[in-house]
């Protein structure tokens, strides 16, 4: 690994670790609740290869699942209560499964993390699930833009469905988990993260059409092409609640309404659309969303053709568009992409909602070390907290471990 700080992400995770983590969390569950769990479930975080800020515009995305994620040990309860504890948070939270949207209850900051599992329980309640005792463990860094919230929602959702014998297909479950985040946690996210966590498969990225909900698996194996895909946690913490994400979403909706289309996905003639919008901010937003959807299609074509190195150019174009047109990048992300390219990377871009979180860098495997060092040096020069690196391996989506 590069830059010397991969350890900061914790122990190596793989198929095996899922099982080990399952056994360990089972014991911890016994210590917390005085009984064995009925089962253990895992849901991964994600990296989005390309297609940023397109999901809530009914567009296309191309994420893959990480090997890291959230593991939940759980036991069914029939008293309508959800009792949720986390190995990463000091406060235990007990709440009725029947209740108003969590966001309306004004929970204090130390309970905020539990809005996700409790919110999922409240949404799924309408579909026949009930209470549970849950112990949560995560090996995903929070605030790194790798979708730890979606992983938490999806692991909880799978656990509740299995415990209460409720069958919901995964695309529908992704929409329900998204609904929990929107209505219960009050975060206006799109459909990408929950779909990635539930639908991805090892060795593939997931091409998802966020309007139709249809998806297909696109082979993605950088190692086989002599490439390494690095995830760089820029250590600038990312949160969607901060207002800018919601503002971007509102701007896109306003532009769509001015253009007379249901969503920016429907803009076919970019020049005409740009010509008819007076507001330069809305023009920039439209430019990004329309071109980003085309970049997803082009990327899928390149990957299916086995032209992985050429995909670097798509990453660079996406980053520039997110920086200059959608205006959601941040200084550490720009410096990371810049340093990586100078050191010989094929491409790089910020991922996720923006204003903090992670960057992906595609580098020839033989140069990955040098690229990581160059990025670390760029941070040192500016006096920033050193970045953390993770080699991203496309992994399986959410599943029951035991
Ligand atoms: C966050 C949201 C997603 C998506 C991305 C931007 O990750 O949760 O729904 O909108 O930002 O592409």
Image (cartoon, rainbow, N blue to C red):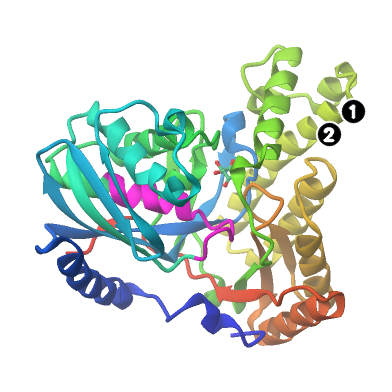
Query: In the drawing, does residue 378 fall left or right of residue 177?
Result: right
Looking at the image, residue 355 sits to the left or right of residue 14; the answer is right
Depicted 102 relative to depicted 37: above or below: above
Q: Which contiguous range is marked in magenta? A: 141-157
Q: Secondary structure at mark 2?
A: helix
Which quadrant of the figure contains the N terminus? bottom right
Numbered tag placed on residue 280 in the rendering? 1
Vertical arrangement, residue 24 with respect to residue 240, above or below? below
Quadrant hosting residue 78: top left
Which image quadrant: the C terminus? bottom left
Asked if labels 2 and 1 touch by Cβ distance under 8 angstroms, the answer is yes
Residue 322 locus on image (x, y percent): 76, 47
Quadrant of the picture in which ligand 1 is shown: top right
Residue 99 position by quadrant? top left
The Cα atoms of the two marked residues, 1 and 2, are separated by: 6 Å
- Residue where numbered disc 2 is placed: 284
Residue 394 percent across, percent down from the top left: 46, 65
| Of the pair 102 and 314, the residue shown nearer to us | 102
> x%, y% of residue 270?
80, 27
Q: Is residue 202 visible?
A: no
């Amino acid at each position: 690994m590069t830059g010397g700080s991969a350890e900061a992400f914790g122990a190596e995770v793989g198929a095996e670790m899922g099982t080990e983590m399952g056994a360990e969390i089972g014991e911890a569950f016994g210590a917390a609740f005085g009984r064995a769990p009925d089962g253990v479930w895992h849901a991964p975080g994600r990296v989005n290869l390309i297609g940023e800020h397109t999901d809530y515009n009914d567009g296309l995305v191309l994420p893959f699942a990480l090997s890291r994620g959230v593991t939940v040990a759980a036991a069914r309860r029939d008293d309508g209560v959800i009792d949720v504890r986390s190995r990463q948070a000091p406060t235990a939270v007990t709440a009725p499964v029947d209740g108003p949207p969590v966001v309306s209850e004004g929970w204090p900051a130390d309970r905020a993390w539990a809005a996700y599992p409790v919110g999922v329980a409240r949404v799924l309640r309408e579909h026949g699930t009930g209470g549970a005792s849950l112990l949560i463990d995560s090996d995903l860094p929070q605030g790194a833009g790798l979708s730890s919230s979606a992983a938490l929602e999806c692991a909880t959702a799978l656990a509740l469905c299995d415990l209460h014998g409720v069958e919901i297909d995964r695309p529908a479950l992704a929409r329900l988990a998204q609904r929990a985040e929107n209505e219960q946690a009050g975060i206006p996210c799109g459909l990408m993260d929950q779909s990635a966590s539930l639908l991805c498969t090892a060795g593939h990225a997931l091409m998802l059409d966020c309007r139709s909900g249809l998806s297909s698996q696109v082979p993605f194996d950088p190692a086989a092409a002599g490439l390494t895909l690095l995830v760089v946690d820029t250590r600038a913490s990312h949160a969607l609640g901060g207002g800018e994400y919601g503002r971007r979403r509102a701007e896109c909706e306003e532009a769509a309404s001015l253009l007379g289309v249901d969503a920016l996905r429907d803009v076919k003639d970019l020049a005409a659309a740009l010509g008819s919008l007076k507001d330069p901010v809305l023009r920039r937003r439209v430019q990004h969303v329309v071109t980003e959807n085309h970049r997803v299609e082009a990327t899928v074509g390149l990957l299916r053709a086995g032209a992985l190195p050429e995909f670097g150019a798509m990453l660079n174009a996406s980053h520039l568009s997110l920086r200059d047109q959608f205006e959601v990048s941040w200084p550490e992300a720009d410096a990371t992409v810049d340093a990586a390219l100078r050191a010989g990377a094929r491409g790089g871009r910020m991922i996720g909602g923006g204003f903090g979180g992670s960057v992906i860098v595609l580098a020839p495997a033989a140069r990955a070390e040098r690229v990581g060092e160059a990025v670390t040096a760029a941070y040192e020069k500016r006096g920033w907290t050193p970045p953390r690196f993770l080699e991203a391996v496309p992994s399986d989506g959410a599943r029951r471990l035991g």
